[in-house]
Amino acid sequence: MKFHPISMETWSRKPYFEHYMNRVRCTYSMTANIDIAILQAELKRKNVKLYPALIHMIATAVNRHPEFRTCFDSEGRLGIWERMSPSFTIFHEEDSTFSSIWTPYSEDFGAFYKRCLQETERYKHARQLFPCPDEPPNTFPISSIPWVNFTGFNLNIYGEGNFLLPIFTMGKYDRQHDKLWLPVSAQLHHAVCDGYHAGVLFNELQELASDCRSWLAGV
């Protein structure tokens, strides 16, 4: 997958990037509720699992916008991945541990779903944090805490503060009348994403959940 280096001198975001990397280096998190009532009903009708559908929704939104695909590569160059794939956690009930695996992103949900189930089955008994030997650099992390209906979630990442990709965490959904609210948290780096971009992200996740029949049609 192609990595496109950014020309800093012609990049419109240069002053923002330099401020939030060199002067006030910071990340921020935002949690919003997504109504997945229509999505869950459609998935039940088709006998399709919810978790892969949510992963695909997030990956679809991420791949629509370069702000969520901007990072440093292994050579330290700042640039934008042409496409990102999700790296996501699976839970091992036997010992309450988890593994992080990945599935190549495809706009075709049917193809993505099939591969996601295959990878989950392959590593369901893995006892490693990262069991996949071939995970590429153009992945971003997704995890789920389905036991807690949280209203906020914040990751405290220590180090040099140069991890620029978004990190997503989902919680336990809660039914309220005809709504089914799923908390979704996004950890973002201010050097590449502002509040506007976060708003676009969550609005598109809601649109994807509400208009799910279109992208689930082929399943």
Image (spheres, grey):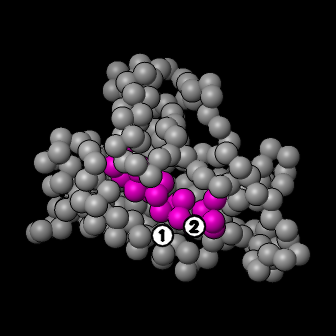
Residue 170, visible in the rendered structure: no
Disc 2 crowd, CA 10 A, few/some/many (<14, 14-19, 20+): some
Q: Nearer the viewer, residue 7 or 124?
A: 7
Q: Does the magenta stretch mainly form a helix, a strand or a loop?
A: helix
Q: Is residue 66 magenta?
A: yes
Q: Is residue 17 above or below residue 208?
A: below
Direction from residue 35 to residue 7 in the image, left or right: right
Asked where in the image residue 42 lies, by quadrant, the reply is: bottom left
Disc 1 crowd, CA 10 A, few/some/many (<14, 14-19, 20+): some
Q: Is residue 42 above or below residue 104?
A: below
- The residue to which callout 1 is attached is 201
Residue sitting at x 47%, y 62%? 61
Q: Quadrant of the N terminus?
A: top right
Q: Which amino acid, by three-letter code, is at mark 1?
A: Leu
- Callout 1: helix, strand or loop? helix
Residue sitting at x 78%, y 49%? 73
Q: Is residue 179 above or below residue 59?
A: below
Q: Residue furthest left?
A: 177
